[in-house]
Image (cartoon, coloured by chain):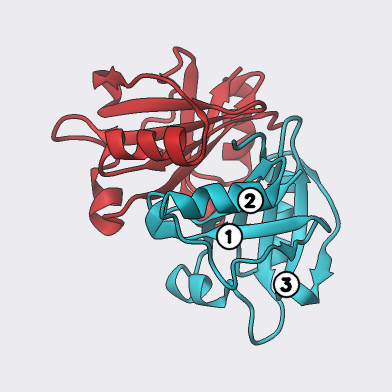
Chain colours: A red, B cyan
Amino acid sequence: MIGRLNHVAIAVPDLEAAAATYRDVLGADVKPPQAEPDHGVTVVFIELPNTKIELLTPLGDASPIRAFLDKNPSGGIHHVCYEVDDIIAARDRLKATGARVLGSGEPKIGAHGKPVLFLHPKDFNGTLVELEQA
Amino acid sequence: MIGRLNHVAIAVPDLEAAAATYRDVLGADVKPPQAEPDHGVTVVFIELPNTKIELLTPLGDASPIRAFLDKNPSGGIHHVCYEVDDIIAARDRLKATGARVLGSGEPKIGAHGKPVLFLHPKDFNGTLVELEQA
């Protein structure tokens, strides 16, 4: 069911510093910051030859990554995102196995403008999993 | 400097259960377990179209992932691995910027039979980074 790894998301307390590390220390292709107010984050995409890293920092008071950064003040790997062909079929298959879909269970439009869902980390080895319709 | 994302490593307390989740729930291409006694882990590779997930569980008493699982008993994302063309040149460039290379600073042969180094998470936004010579 799952296809490509769309991205790995890393939550960071200081987006500018983290972007500079990836650009200047690791020598990666780092894009400019993008505010995503609907998702409560500002994002920097790092384009690797086969996938992306997304650096995330909170935007606004209700950011979904605030609690993670409170627990991990230096930052850390927040989630992985796998592509699926049909997000409704994927959701229904997952629910049939007992896996928990976060929120209302209805896909939202994610930071790439495509439908996404998040799955409960307790059902996936402590890993927050995002599914994105490719 | 960094190239492809070679893999994302996820530490898990129960390798068989985690492999079954990726195979049966997420429908991924899951390979058989491989014991890596030199690295203190047993590994299951999950082949995605563009990269790999490595599920890791401790092997032996001195496993390098034991402390992580003590802190994260359900498991969690342990590290990301980026490919580099020349690991010695990469190491020297990193050290010149002040980034800390773990261990002796000399590359070891990793689970794929290629030279690897690990970088200090405190220098990379709380993320343990492995470099592998491609």
What subunit carries mark 3?
B
Lateral position of residue A133 relative to residue B55, left or right: left
* Residue B18 horizontal side relative to residue A106, left or right: right
Q: Amino acid at mark 3?
A: His
Q: Residue furthest top?
A: A113
Residue B118, numbered label: 1
Q: Nearer the viewer, mark 3 or mark 1?
A: 1
Chain label for disc 2: B
Say if mark 3 contacts mark 2, CB within 8 Å. no
Above or below B98: residue A20: above
Who comes first in sequence, dot 2 or dot 1? 1
Asked whether, in this view, residue A37 is left or right of residue B123, the answer is: left
- The reply to whether residue B21 is in sight is no
Circles 2 and 1: CB atoms closer than 8 Å: yes
Amino acid on which the number 1 mark rests in the picture: Phe
Residue B82 in percent (x, y) is at 63, 43
Secondary element type, mark 2: strand
Residue at mark 3 to residue at mark 2: CA–CA distance? 16 Å
| Residue B24 in picture, x, y percent from top left | 74, 46
> Can residue B95 be seen at all in this image of the molecule?
yes
How far apart in space, not on screen, are marks 3 and 1 (Cα)? 13 Å
Determine which of the numbered discs, if any, sits on residue B39 in the image.
Answer: 3
Residue under the image location 42 percent in, 41 percent down: A10
The answer to whether marks 3 and 1 sit on the same chain is yes
